Image (cartoon, helix red, strand yellow):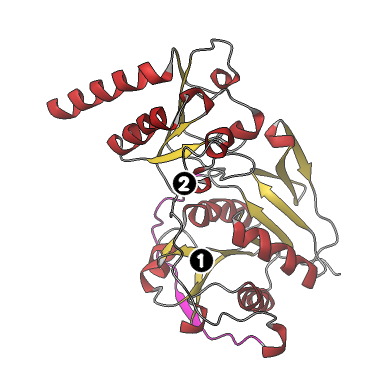
Amino acid sequence: MEQNQTQNVLAYVETAGGKPVNVGLELLTLARTIADAAGQKVTAALIGSGLDEAAQRLAALGADKVVVVDDPAYTAFSMDEYTGVLEQLVKDENPAVFLMGNTPQGKGIVPRLAARFQSGCVADVTAVSIENGALHWTTPRFGGTVLAEEVIENSAVQFATVRTGAFSKPETAQNTAPVEKKTVSVPADSIRTKIREAVKELTESVNLEDADVIVSGGRGMGSAENFKLVEELAALLGGVVGATRPAIEDGWVSRAHQVGQSGKIVAPKLYIACGISGATQHVSGMSSSGFVVAINKDEDAAIFDVANVGIIGDAVKVIPAMIEEIRKAKAEA
């Protein structure tokens, strides 16, 4: 397929509850970097209903244009419909690069789009460099222990998903971008599945990806009773509870809290690892955290290699002391 000679960037920003998710805002920073290097433009896209506030937020964050497909038909997520809408937007905007977060939606949609445009696709991007006009995408391998550099050639559009926390959110721009509302109809014969009814999920809803503070517990907490200390510390700090796979498999907390390669990829401002050894599968999911505090009685635990502050001690004894001191500090504030 003939290569697109522009470097215009189309960034699809997912929303949750009518608000942009963190990675959706973060990928705007990457979009701006790519576009500025070639003197081109950034278009941010939204799909859903009642997104005026979200559109205005994106318009103030450095995009050159915001396109909103505002239709009640797209209130509930449908893989076929959203893929069809984004396919049409790619045709309309004719970008050289399409970006989306490396979320469950992104992992499902972006490869489909790449196939439809017979183009290259990279997943879980953590960095990008531009050499002689070519984009060199950095992606993790083997749980983040190896970084690969990928170059897409002979593609009209380069498709990529972006890892949560890999880029900072953009700062407010001086100028507000125009907002364009569009109506996009997806051909009925392209929709293989239909949402007949939206039923509220009864499982626990945990927003680990957007949390500023995460307190995670691992096997070192010892029991479900001790794991409640993790929950207490998280609540005190206004944070969210995370966990490793062993803690989940032992039934101490639901799978919705899992952080790691087979769970959620997170990048909070503060990550407190309690009784976590630091296995690669877990570390790959939290290594982008701003500040890491690790508590483990094994002084050789691998988690200390990625921690900013390490506390050698039994987490079951250390956490109550932390809770007491934090409460004192709050009372004196």
Does residue 31 lie above or below 163 as drawn?
below
Q: Nearer the viewer, residue 16 or 183?
A: 16
The quarter in which the N terminus is drawn is: bottom right
Residue 47 locus on image (x, y percent): 52, 73
Does residue 67 lie above or below 292 as drawn?
below
Q: Is 136 on the left or on the right of 262, as rendered? A: right
Q: Secondary structure at mark 1?
A: loop
Does residue 297 lie above or below 168 as drawn?
above
CA–CA distance in space, label 1 to label 2? 30 Å
Say which label, 1 or 2, has the lower sequence index: 1
Locate residue 175: give its quadrant: bottom left
Question: Which residues fall within the magenta stretch?
Answer: 168-186
Q: Main secondary structure of the magenta part?
A: loop
Question: Residue sitting at 44 percent across and 51 percent down?
Answer: 207
From the image, tell me which residue sits under label 2. Answer: 208
Locate residue 119: give its quadrant: bottom right
From the image, tell me which residue sits under label 1. Answer: 64
Question: Residue sitting at 54 percent across and 44 percent down?
Answer: 167
Amino acid type at image mark 1: Asp
The quarter in which the C terminus is drawn is: top left
Amino acid type at image mark 2: Leu
Question: Residue sitting at 13 percent across and 25 percent down?
Answer: 332
Q: Is 294 on the left or on the right of 136, as rendered? A: left
Seen from this angle, which residue lies furthest left?
332
